[in-house]
Amino acid sequence: MAGWISDHVPYEKRGRYIGIIEISWALGLLIGVSAMGVITALISWRAGFIAGAIGITVSLAFIAARIKTEPHEVSSRIADDGIRLRGRAWLVVATMFATMCASQCIFITFGAWLDDQFGLGALGIAAVGFSFGLVELYASVTSAKKTDSWGKERSIAIGCLIMIPGGLALSLVSNNLVLGLLALMVYILGFEFAVVSMLPLATHLVPKRPGSGLGLVFGAGTLGRGVMSLVATRAYESSNGIALPAIIGSTSAAVATILIYQYHRRGGLVHE
């Protein structure tokens, strides 16, 4: 979808429009996932998945009926002239890898933490997911308003920096439900703002090939999630809690901050 936006919106305005699209992601978590959690708790997990499938079908029908199919490209494309991702642009790919490592440390363990530490079941975790949806909604709205004016690289760094104290605080207050959730919300706020701000930058990493940059960045993010899924779950089990995964997540966020700073210091986004 970000590639489609790059064909319709100039780079200078992409932060706003990608942020608006990401608002729908936050609303999906806020409304859709919470509803699926309630349905799962009241009926069964199968009913929750059926409800999700119905929602997807309705959304697809709505989009298919309204998006025009004629070509419209703001980013001029070429068949193949040898242009590839190179030089400092790889630092953005590495930044996404580290950022997704940081997020996965928490996302894959917080449900078990809430259940093991505080006895929250499916309904309680759904309520927590609803509150996280509010946080993601705020981050997406803020990104839509500020990323273009603040600059994509600076916005990414701000988001990653916010994650660091959030994760460290979570490691210290993980035995307290209220304080732990507040720290977790700060962490998620920083992550969502960083990732939404990174997408418009990814569309412009490879000149005239928005999909290439996006594909590499998303691929790095997927790899980061996969690697950290193994690391975070083992850390959670070995330490009997979320404190160690939170520390690993904060460290990954710090690495992401350093990487995007190095990218900016070396000249940032410049197409020869």
Image (cartoon, rainbow, N blue to C red):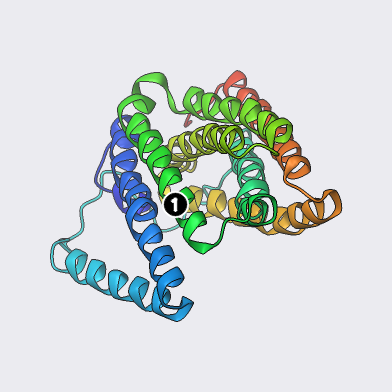
* Quadrant housing the N terminus: bottom left
Residue that badge 1 annotates: 127
Drawn side of residue 238 relative to residue 254, left or right: right
**Residue located at (31% from left, 70% from top):** 56
User: Horizontal and vertical percent for residue 10?
Assistant: 28, 36
Frontmost residue, 208 versus 201:
201
User: Horizontal and vertical percent for residue 75?
Assistant: 32, 44
Drawn side of residue 141 relative to residue 160, left or right: left
**Residue located at (62% from left, 23% from top):** 261
User: Outermost residue toward the right?
Assistant: 238
Is 236 placed above or below 203 here?
below
User: Horizontal and vertical percent for residue 108?
Assistant: 64, 55
Give the quarter of the image for residue 177: top right
Give the quarter of the image for residue 226: bottom right
Mark 1 crowdedness (10 Å alpha carbons): few <14, some 14-19, many ≥20: some
Secondary structure beneath label 1: helix
